[in-house]
Image (tube, helix red, strand yellow):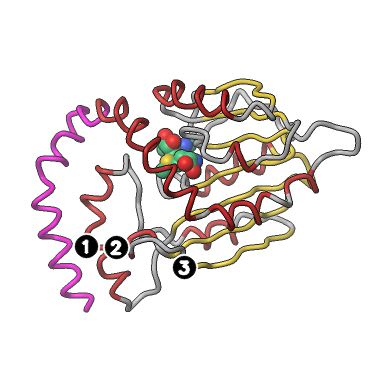
Amino acid sequence: MSFLMTICTLVVNVLCSPLHLIHAVGLYQIYKRFFPSYLYRITEGYNKIMCDPKKELFRSLPEFNKPGGQLTILEIGCGTGANFEFFPPGCKVICTDPNRHFQRYLKKSMDQNDHLTYERFVVSSGEDMGSVEDESIDVVVCTLVLCSVNDVPQTLREVQRILRPGGAFFFIEHVAAKASTWAHFFQHVFQPAWYYVLDGCEVTRETWKHVEAAGFSELKLRHIEAPFMFMVKPHIIGYAIK
Ligand SMILES: C[S@@+](CC[C@H](N)C(=O)[O-])C[C@H]1O[C@@H](n2cnc3c(N)ncnc32)[C@H](O)[C@@H]1O
């Protein structure tokens, strides 16, 4: 199976060579302008399907508030603001994303979710959130982002840096399917094309290994089969406490 997978992946890579070229000369950046409107449309469907797991996960958010304080949530790769509706009333939200073109859609989500206080939108990658002070955040939220960051361990180090002791990292991520399954096979074969359609998304990442190795004091992580097509069916969901 592994030989067949290598050959098929090679064929898809060859078919994608015009896209590799566009990427190599920097023209793929233009897609960053259009990706937010595409994501805005697919987010509604994703949230409908994942409504119950999201509600269940984010129900634990208030546990990480300081006594008498206002819960401060920082979202990495916030995109269009798909998670705002699941955050508890009254919390303060700092949004970050490297793609500034999300701002228009973010504003829409903020207007629709006026139960939250929005502090600011920071244009930054998860690997470098330098403008956020050490140990200043109660909760970091990250959904469908670790598949796209350039450096997962560095992003998790940044999460650890900005979280206060006892703060938590909440995540929902699609991940690589089990080895020797057809889902694993097709994830690898279609990955080269998928990368361009979904703005740098890699479906073959074993992200749970990085979360497990990140040195959190407590980790609640579940593997689930989300009701989506095979490429993004395996998910991990949970939270980790600093
Ligand atoms: C599939 S979207 C998910 C958006 C949102 N979190 C959600 O659940 O709908 C992936 C997001 O990750 C962002 N992203 C890509 N590279 C990133 C990086 N290095 N650091 C942080 N976010 C990144 C993208 O701009 C995009 O907003």
Which residue is identified by label 2? 187
- The percent position of residue 67, horizontal first and vertical second, equals 90, 38
Question: Which badge, 3 or 2, is on the more N-terminal residue?
Answer: 2
Kindly report the distance in space between the C-alpha atoms of the residues bearing marks 3 and 1: 20 Å
Q: What element carries label 1?
A: helix
State whether label 3 is within 8 Å of ligand 1.
no
Assess whether residue 21 is covered by the magenta stretch. Answer: yes
Q: Nearer the viewer, mark 3 or mark 1?
A: 3
- The percent position of residue 105, horizontal first and vertical second, equals 45, 26
Which residue is identified by label 1? 189
- Which segment did they paint magenta? 1-29
Dominant secondary-structure state across the stretch colored magenta: helix
| Residue at image location 28% in from the left, 47% down from the top | 195
**Three-letter code, disc 1:** Val
Kindly report the distance in space between the C-alpha atoms of the residues bearing marks 3 and 2: 15 Å
**Three-letter code, disc 3:** Glu
Q: Do the residues labelled 1 and 2 touch (CB within 8 Å)?
A: yes
Which residue is identified by label 3? 225
